Image: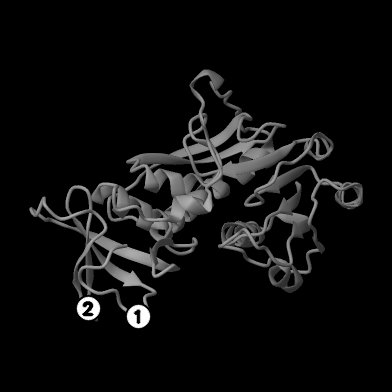
Amino acid sequence: MRVFFIGTVEFSKNLLQKLIELNVQVVGVCTREKSYFHSDFSDLSTLCEENKIPYKFVKDINSSLNIEWIKSLVPDIIFCFGWSSLIKEELLGLAPMGVVGFHPAKLPQNRGRHPLIWALALGLKKSASTFFFMDEKADSGDILSQKDFNILDTDDARILYNKVLDIALIQLEKIIPQLENKTFKKIKQNHKIANTWRKRENIDSEIDFRMNSKAIYNLVRALAKPYVGAHVKHNGKKIAVWKVKIVENSQNNIEYGKIIYSNQDKIIVKTIDGSIEILEHEFVKFPKVGEYL
């Protein structure tokens, strides 16, 4: 089975490495030389060079030149893991077995952008690791493999990213022989129960202390590394916040956003229903007690 691979993030690199370890015939790779919108960007060219796999740095995967190059490699199937732009009709129909994509959500629910971030920010308790056959719409094609996983209150973005990666690697090991032997099954998605998550905007990263403490905790862990980080504004500057914890506070006569404790060890800020202790941050000049965030 001749596989063409498309990807440009840390997740992509790990799955490409797994294909190499499984002795899958990877006939070519399209990746990016750099990315300004993938915080988990990873250049796949070194891995390709080490394993003598032809590769190209591309911007538009759907361009006629790129499609002609992929076609010349005569792939049986295309894997597209971690690309964040739609694959158009001509490329979708190029390989006889189609294009397999990946989405870390329990499809048909939660299609769209930033699935791990939204799952954590919304406080979901469960999700799934899903391989599917891509079509012209986002995340709507037939499911090839889906594995549920739990999301713990202690999971942050890095923990959840690694959890999904470990599950996906196990799935991939099972999928490959099914694809090679044509024993795989396709599961139609129920589009009636589908929803689509929107693209995260910069304002979605800002901590608003009018939110309750649990919502702030979820937002911060959702945007922890490898993502961009949540932030507060202090003296007109954005300050990244990487880790917080919920602190009980019975003082109901203090306004939200007011700093009630601050030293070199910790900063505690009043929320609408309690307090948040900021544990990891990028403050250079610490805010003072009585100031507001």
Residue at image location 72% in from the left, 53% down from the top: 5
Q: Position of residue 80 (x, y in %)?
A: 68, 47
Within-10-Å neighbours for mark 2: few <14, some 14–19, many 20+ = few
- In the picture, the quarter occupied by the C terminus is bottom left
Residue 162, by quadrant, is bottom left
The answer to whether residue 274 is left or right of residue 192 is: left
Q: Where is residue 7 in the image (x, y as percent from the top left)?
A: 68, 55
* Secondary structure at numbered mark 2: loop
Residue at image location 53% in from the left, 40% down from the top: 130
Label 2, label 1: how far apart the Cα atoms are: 13 Å
Q: Is residue 191 above or below residue 42?
A: above
Closer to us: mark 2 or mark 1? 1
Residue at image location 34% in from the left, 52% down from the top: 208
Name the residue carrying label 2. 265
* Secondary structure at numbered mark 1: loop
Say which of 109 and 232 sits in front: 232
Q: Which of marks 2 and 1 is nearer the N terminus?
A: 2
Q: In this view, does 137 lie above or below 153?
A: above
Residue at image location 51% in from the left, 26% down from the top: 194
Q: Where is residue 89 in the image (x, y as percent from the top left)?
A: 80, 34
Q: Which residue ends up furthest to the top in the rendered image?
A: 192
Q: Is residue 46 above or below residue 66?
A: below
Q: Where is residue 261 in the image (x, y as percent from the top left)?
A: 17, 70
The circle on residue 285 is: 1
